[in-house]
């Protein structure tokens, strides 16, 4: 909340609503939802009242700087797609997006060279189709590994809960990735991404063997 990041606030809201929907489907009651959300609602209300001026500027995007930020993001989307089409197979190289922008348009001010505020577009522009194919291999290997480990859980309820948690992680990550680039363009973002999916897949290291398999 205190980051005042629109994408972070949106990701938080989406995950909370999705989690409430899942809890309601399981319990068919609003009491668990009210119990778990009471603290979040209280803290959010207090912070929103105290920090309303700053929060208002970020949400309404009516100030000159906020409007310019939105325009720059839209321009970055178009530029990244054009760069991808011009270098569709191998891309411009990992971490070389801003350098390539400076090469094709050296007339800008230094601070105007920014990565596209979208992880997918930035990744495609820097690695191309070859990088996308390699990424798909990594994703498939993670999915196969997790499904294989999940087959050895004792209870199907545990598997259902794991899948639910992973879904919430992925939804949160994709929301952040759609509006920002720092998840793959900065050291802090890469560490956050690693921790993010490390938490998502930690359950596979706590596998309880099935009785039939153990015997």
Image (cartoon, rainbow, N blue to C red):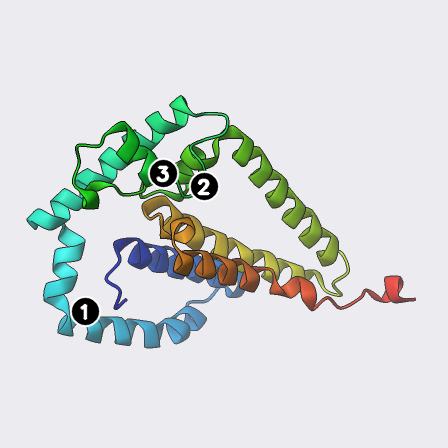
Determine the image quadrant of residue 31: bottom left
Q: Which of 91 and 35 is in front in this view?
A: 91
Q: Which of 131 and 30 is in front in this view?
A: 131
Residue visible at 55% across and 31% down?
130
Residue indicated by mark 3: 97
> Disc 2 to disc 3, how far (Cα)?
7 Å
Residue 110: percent from left, percent from top? 20, 44
Q: What count of labels does the image hold?
A: 3
Select label 1 or label 3 by which is in front.
3
Rate crowding at label 1 as few (under 14), some (14 to 19) or many (20 or more) other CA atoms within 10 Å: some
Secondary structure of residue under mark 2? loop
Determine the image quadrant of residue 101: top left
Vertical comparison of 148 with 33: above or below: above
> Disc 1 to disc 3, how far (Cα)?
37 Å
Residue indicated by mark 2: 94
Residue indicated by mark 1: 48
Q: Nearer the viewer, residue 103 or 78?
A: 103
Residues under numbered marks 1 and 3 in contact, where contact means CB atoms less than 8 Å apart = no
């Amino acid at each position: 909340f205190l980051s005042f990041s629109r994408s972070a606030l949106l990701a938080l809201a989406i995950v909370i609503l999705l989690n409430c929907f899942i809890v309601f489907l399981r319990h068919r009651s609003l009491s668990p939802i009210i119990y778990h959300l009471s603290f979040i609602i209280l803290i959010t209300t207090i912070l929103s009242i105290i920090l309303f001026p700053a929060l208002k500027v970020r949400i309404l995007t009516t100030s000159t700087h906020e409007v310019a930020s939105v325009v720059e993001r839209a321009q970055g989307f178009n530029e990244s797609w054009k760069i991808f089409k011009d270098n569709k197979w191998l891309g411009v190289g990992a971490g070389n997006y801003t350098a390539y922008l400076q090469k094709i348009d050296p007339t800008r001010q230094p601070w105007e060279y920014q990565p596209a505020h979208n992880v997918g577009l930035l990744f495609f522009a820097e690695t191309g189709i070859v990088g996308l194919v390699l990424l798909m291999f990594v994703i498939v290997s993670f999915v196969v590994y997790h499904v294989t480990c999940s087959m050895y859980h004792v209870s199907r309820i545990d598997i259902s809960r794991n899948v639910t948690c992973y879904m919430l992680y992925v939804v949160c990550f994709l929301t952040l990735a759609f509006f920002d680039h720092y998840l793959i363009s900065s050291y802090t973002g890469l560490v956050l991404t690693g921790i993010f999916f490390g938490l998502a897949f930690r359950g596979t290291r706590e596998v309880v063997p099935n009785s039939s398999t153990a015997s």
